[in-house]
Amino acid sequence: MLRRQTGFGLIAALFLLVILAALGIAITFIVGVQQNTASLDALGSQAYQAARAGVEWAAYQVTGSTTPTCNGTLTFAGTSLQNFTTTVTCTQTITTEGSTTIRLYNIVSDACDDPNAGACPNTGSTSKIYTERQLTVVIGGL
């Protein structure tokens, strides 16, 4: 008496279906993470460019004026950096070497992108995505 075993194909099909579903979920998760990473990378590059614009603005203020003042806030309306706010602060140090007076300007440019930020740096950010870059430059002149 031989008994036919039935149902093995159903179990194998269910096992294969579960494996393929898990693989699909894993691929969807990985693609989402990659998209978020690329988006954050682009925001980081934009924040760097906004901070660099602040440094260049301050350098122009320092070198192009007899009474330099380079503290301020920059906005970029109508550009790809329109969501960024850049706060620039400068401190001047005057030193003397021999009979020569040297002026040093410490420029700090802080750029951030946060819908809740009034200015940079924003220590009270409630946003899940907060992008900020800070550049510090020292410019010297006679």
Image (cartoon, rainbow, N blue to C red):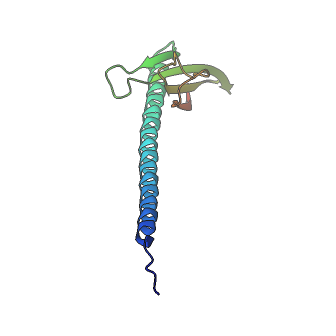
Question: Which image quadrant for residue 141?
Answer: top right
Q: Is residue 40 left or right of residue 125?
A: left
Q: Residue at x 56, y 20 (%)?
A: 89
Q: Is 141 situated above or below 66? A: below
Question: Which image quadrant for residue 101?
Answer: top right
Q: Residue at x 46, y 48 (%)?
A: 29
How many numbered discs? 0
Instruction: State the image coordinates of residue 38 (x, y, percent, origin top left).
Output: 42, 44
Q: Is residue 81 left or right of residue 102?
A: left
Question: Which image quadrant for residue 121?
Answer: top right
Q: Is 129 or 61 nearer to us in this picture?
A: 129
Instruction: State the image coordinates of residue 137 (x, y, percent, origin top left).
Output: 56, 31
Instruction: State the image coordinates of residue 78 (x, y, percent, origin top left).
Output: 31, 21
Q: Is 86 or 9 nearer to us in this picture?
A: 9
For the view shown, which residue lies furthest in the left direction?
Answer: 78
Q: Is 61 or 53 nearer to us in this picture?
A: 53
Q: Is residue 43 left or right of residue 99?
A: left
Q: Residue at x 46, y 46 (%)?
A: 33
For the view shown, which residue lies furthest in the front direction?
Answer: 1
For the view shown, which residue lies furthest in the top direction?
Answer: 67
Image quadrant where one finds the C terminus:
top right
Instruction: State the image coordinates of residue 83 (x, y, percent, origin top left).
Output: 41, 24
Q: Residue at x 51, y 15 (%)?
A: 118
Q: Is 64 or 69 nearer to us in this picture?
A: 69
